[in-house]
Amino acid sequence: MPFEVYPLKERIGSRVEIDSKYLGHPEEVAEIRGLLLERGVLVFKEQHLSDEQQLGLARLLGTLREELGKGIYKITLDKKSNAHAEYLKGSFLWHIDGTHDDIPPFATLLTGLTLSETGGQTEFANSYAAYEELPQETKDRIDNLQVVHSVEVSMSRAGIEPTAENLEYWKSFKPKTHNLVWTHKSGRKSLVIGCHASHIVGMDRSKSDALIKDLLDWATQPKFVYRHEWTPGDLIIWDNTGVIHRVEPYPLDCGRIMHRSTLMGEEPFA
């Protein structure tokens, strides 16, 4: 095997040491995909991949989502480069990408180009492990519950100004109801929670809020979390179906730029 793997935390994350040329080889990438499903987050330090290399790797890992017709989405709070920059403040809160869809993205590739001097670390929490280690009485309580997820709720919680234009855009994403516990095709189960989780169907609102908070606090305790300190050129790949994530706040004018590629979902929330 032309690469070496080192665990980052017991329950989440591995660092992969590999020559970038092998990231274009289908055989090696197939092994990397298997490792991603097992460990949730893979870190490739200082790879300095070009956009073309990142896109090539993404296409070998799954089906690339052609964002803006390119497959590379520029993550920056600079409005000159990203018309929806302010919405990225929502990434400061724990979330799963795509809860406003029936089928969420499978995985995300993110390369760090220009970093912030302060903040900007990214945290990942293993929602598979978080579910598996819940007390049985909690599992019994939540296994059949459903949660409404809302873009408007997540943007409001992120403190983004609810202008008429923003509200119209947020409301264009209709709320979606998903099982609180996602039973995957593999048989594994994970928690579907985050800042977008509005309320539990049929539950008193105060009890709903308390339960969602308790579960999010449980899932994001240190033993389930890997926190990444970026260096230029780092590549991170994470399984969006079994990992929740957030970025630590950073100055809006710092020039931080990341290049993201997203892989299309392969199974619906169920």
Image (tube, helix red, strand yellow):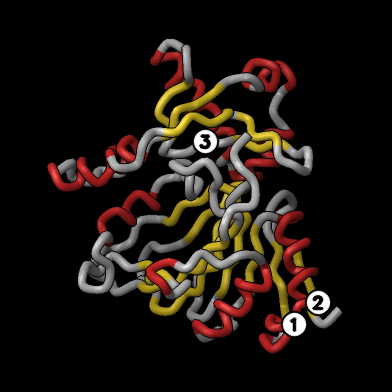
Name the side, left or right, on which 115 lies relative to 32: left
Residue 140's disc is none
Residue carrying label 2: 27
- Residue 112: x and y in percent read 47, 74
Name the side, left or right, on which 48 lies relative to 181: left
* Residue at image point 58% right, 28% down: 179
* Residue at image point 43% right, 79% down: 113
- Residue 124: x and y in percent read 56, 52
Task: Report how far apart the C-alphas of labels 3 and 1 lie in the structure.
Answer: 35 Å
> Do the residues bearing badges 2 and 1 touch, measured as CB atoms within 8 Å?
yes
Name the side, left or right, on which 59 lies relative to 80: right
- Residue 105: x and y in percent read 55, 53
Task: Report how far apart the C-alphas of labels 2 and 1 lie in the structure.
Answer: 6 Å
* Residue at image point 52% right, 34% down: 216
Label 1 Cα crowd, 10 Å radius (few <14 / some 14-19 / many 20+): few
The relative height of residue 129 versus residue 90 in the rendered view (above or below) is above
